[in-house]
């Protein structure tokens, strides 16, 4: 499954500064929605654009600084210029820094590190930049080689949470912001399963996972989603939320767990999920149901939805094991 967009407004990202935003507001760079454009629509700034666009003839190029909503390791950067055709930048370089809450990201002393060499940008296109740097970062700086417009800046990667924030507290380990990942899904006909672990409450039926209608219904017919955790966890709560699924919610659910980890030739879907975390239970439509559970050292869950239907959110909450905290600390130190 895809990495999390660490910069997105939906996970708390913010555009903290920009050299110029004469035609398009800098905050649109991290909007969760896909960019859009209606030709011939004008306001006092000119033609309305869905993105960040600077004035013409910048002598030294322009820049924007983004504070990541979720600090972590970056895998790739997408400098998205969709709908910018004759007004896109000629190229871009993306820098990153690890800053504390007290640091000024616009200060002269910031150690900005280039994530990749300068990259030419295509008009009206996704411009993907691979990142090999394994360090944890909190801020990005997009420097465009000229003036122009960028619709979105996506920073795909994986969270690296501070282990001090996990010690002694209950954590929503399934959440994407905490390193939870959808590893496998049986069906994504109507919508992907990635929304199951998204932050916040669902706002409509499209903000959840919905499979096609099954016509081969039998006693054990079901769809399923596998959600992995960043580290082994003692689970004590599981929430299954069917909000907005009124006539097409899954009728029943069973949550199984594993203490295993994948290995070469043995992916997540091939593991044995033999720990019953939530036994097969009838679900209410358009409702949040919280189950008290007791499952130790779980590394992933498989949510089995009977026979098909829709689920808006799955939340698994618990405390990392001692081994889990050690793994978190090792991961943290390796990313410094």
Image: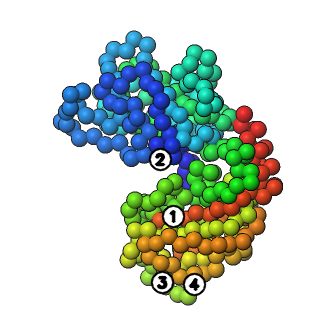
Residue 256 position in % (x across, y down): 66, 73
Q: Are marks 3 and 2 in contact (CB under 8 Å)?
A: no
Q: Nearer the viewer, mark 3 or mark 4?
A: 4
Assign a secondary structure to mark 1: strand
Disc number placed over residue 216 in the picture, else none: 3
Q: Which comes sooner in the sequence, label 3 or label 2?
A: 2
* Residue assigned mark 2: 10
Disc 4 to disc 1, C-alpha distance: 22 Å
Assign a secondary structure to mark 3: loop
User: What is the quadrant of residue 319 in the picture?
Assistant: bottom right
Q: Residue at x 51, y 54 (%)?
A: 199
- In the image as oriented, which residue stretches furthest toward the top? 59
Disc 1 to disc 2, C-alpha distance: 15 Å
Residue 140 position in % (x across, y down): 54, 30
Image height check: is 280 above or below 302? below
Q: Which comes sooner in the sequence, label 4 or label 2?
A: 2
Q: Nearer the viewer, mark 1 or mark 3?
A: 1
Residue 87 position in % (x across, y down): 31, 26
Assign a secondary structure to mark 2: helix
Q: Residue at x 38, y 46 (%)?
A: 34
Disc 3 to disc 4, C-alpha distance: 10 Å
* Residue assigned mark 4: 220
* Residue assigned mark 1: 313
Disc number placed over residue 273 in the picture, else none: none
Q: Which comes sooner in the sequence, label 1 or label 2?
A: 2
Q: Residue at x 72, y 75 (%)?
A: 274
Q: Which comes sooner in the sequence, label 4 or label 1?
A: 4
């Amino acid at each position: 499954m895809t990495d999390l967009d660490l910069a997105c407004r939906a996970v708390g990202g913010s555009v903290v500064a920009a050299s110029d935003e004469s035609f398009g507001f800098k905050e649109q760079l991290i909007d969760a929605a896909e960019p859009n454009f209606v030709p011939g629509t004008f306001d006092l700034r000119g033609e309305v654009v869905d993105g960040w666009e600077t004035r013409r003839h910048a002598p030294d190029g322009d820049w924007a600084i983004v504070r990541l909503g979720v600090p972590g390791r970056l895998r790739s950067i997408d400098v998205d210029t969709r709908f910018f055709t004759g007004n896109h930048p000629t190229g871009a370089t993306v820098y990153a820094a690890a800053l504390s809450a007290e640091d000024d990201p616009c200060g002269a002393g910031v150690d900005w590190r280039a994530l990749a060499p300068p990259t030419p940008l295509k008009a009206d296109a996704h411009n993907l930049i691979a990142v090999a740097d394994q360090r944890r970062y909190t801020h990005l700086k997009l420097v465009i080689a000229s003036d122009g417009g960028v619709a979105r800046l996506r920073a795909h990667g994986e969270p690296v949470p501070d282990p001090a924030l996990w010690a002694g507290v209950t954590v929503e380990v399934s959440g994407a912001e905490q390193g939870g990942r959808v590893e496998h899904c049986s069906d994504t006909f109507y919508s992907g399963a990635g929304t199951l672990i998204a932050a916040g409450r669902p706002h409509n039926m499209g903000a959840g996972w919905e499979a096609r209608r099954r016509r081969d219904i039998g006693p054990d017919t079901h769809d399923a989603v596998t959600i992995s955790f960043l580290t082994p966890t003692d689970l004590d709560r599981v929430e299954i939320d069917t909000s907005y699924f009124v006539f097409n919610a899954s009728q029943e659910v069973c949550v199984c767990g594993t203490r295993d980890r994948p290995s070469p030739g043995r992916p997540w879907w091939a593991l044995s999920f033999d720990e019953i975390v939530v036994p097969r239970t009838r679900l209410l439509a358009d409702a949040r149901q919280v189950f008290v559970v007791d499952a130790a050292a779980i590394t992933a869950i498989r949510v089995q939805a009977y026979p098909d239907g829709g689920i808006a959110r799955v939340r698994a909450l618990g405390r990392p094991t001692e081994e889990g905290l050690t793994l978190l600390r090792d991961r943290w130190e390796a990313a410094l």
